[in-house]
Amino acid sequence: MKKTYLFALLSLTSGIAYSQTPCDEGRYASDVYGTVDVTSNIVYGSNTSFSGATTSLDLDFYEPNGDTSTARPLIIFAHGGSFIGGTKTDSDIVTLCNRFAQKGFVCASINYRVGMWPITAAEATKAVLRAVQDMKASIRWFYQDRATTDTYKIDTTQIYVAGTSAGAITAFHLAYLDKECELEGYMTPTTLTALGGLEGTSGNPGYSTTIAGAIGMGGALASYGWIETGDVPFCATHGTADDVVPYNRGMASVAGIGIIELDGSRAMHGQADIVGVSNNFYSHYGAGHVPHVSNVNTMDTTVNFIRDFLIDNMGCTNPILQPENSPLETVDFYNLMYCGLSVNSLATTAVKGIYPNPSSDKMTVELENFEAVQTIQLIDLSGRVQQTYGATSNAITISKGNLDQGSYILKTTLIDGSSTTNNVVFL
């Protein structure tokens, strides 16, 4: 959903408490606090690592020095590192936490479980899930604090999750991976249950994981189709020449090895616009992976763009300061089916089921009424038709043949000319 922004001059005031009207006197929009207090190594949970070791989960908490507000918006940051490394004290995360605390936000930088072996798509999916579970535990921890000792003075209606690279992937999956069936094709229900389900067992059970929005720098989703009408808003920045996490749709790399296809920020932005989910999207043209990490000017642009997203979604009275950078690239979008139901209701009258999915060789497409179907096409993720089948019975066999292993779109065209995209299939 596109936004039009105005430029304005905002007055600078230090030590202003958060009242009923957000952004009073420049708070949240400007650096109203000169110094930041950091409380390090606060334990928020515990869980088992990929290797089976018990892992304590901790965070660093950043708050404006001298702040008297009793209900402060919180940003929970997750570091990058391809889910095999990184720490809560990574330089860009420390900078981001300090910059936003100076504006009157409070920030938490979390350590979460990292590591996978072997480096495969299946293990990477588990690593993402572990990170999401840990971030959810940190959210619950802050809800628990608000409901009990209220040590950290959090406004629980204004909790945002954020991250860089792997941390951005974590934040976006936390926001939009909300159905267990969305992981079909990635892991079995038994594996998901063994890992602790979507919520996980990293600590603080019984408390909410509700957030106000998600923020990602160089992030992606397994499927942009998980973004649905009514979901929370997001803010995304991404380098157009990113060769680690795809800007649009493509292969994500771990340690230089391309292992899993993801939908990057550009694809997420397009889907969000289609379904009416508010989003702010900024393209760093010609830049590679997370350029804010190594470029001071890009860091400033990133901070300002995220700030604008935050104060806009907080209902601030101040105008937005920085205009959105709308990308020039175009992309074809598919309405993906997941959880056995298609976004397009016509599919339910055309296709009854697809099995086995994933398959190493052949799969069967079971049709509701083959006489209503004109063609079935297997399309790669760049939009090229690889195979076309006529419908001569209610059971059509799809063969991998010489196709590369990976994900494909199965598109059904009805005889009346209407068409549906039914599912992502894995061959």
Image (spheres, rainbow, N blue to C red):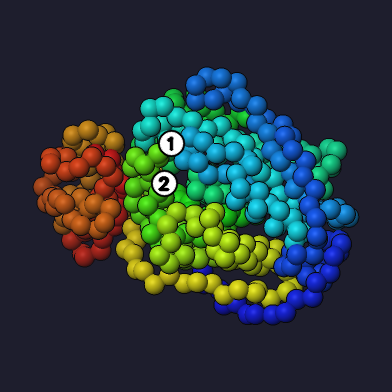
Amino acid, disc 2: Ala
User: Which residue bears the numbered disc 1?
Assistant: 125
Quadrant for the C terminus, please. Answer: top left
The answer to whether the residues at label 1 and label 2 have Cβ atoms under 8 Å apart is: yes
First reached walking from the N terminus: tag 1 or tag 2: 1
Q: Is residue 130 above or below residue 348?
A: above
Mark 1 crowdedness (10 Å alpha carbons): few <14, some 14-19, many ≥20: some
Tell me the SS state at disc 1: helix
**Which residue is rendered at x = 74% and y = 34% of the image?**
42
Tell me if I can see residue 297 in this picture: yes
Residue 281, horizontal then vertical, whole percent: 51, 65
**Residue in the picture at 36% in, 42% down:** 256
| Circle number at residue 221 | none
Q: Considering only vertical position in the picture, is 204 above or below 228?
A: above
Visible residue check, residue 278? no
Report the label total: 2
In this rendered view, identify the residue nearer to me: 398 or 345.
398
Q: In this image, 277 relative to 58: left or right?
A: left
Question: Please, what is the three-letter code of the amino acid marked with disc 1?
Answer: Thr
SS type, badge 2:
loop
Q: Which residue is tagged 2?
A: 222
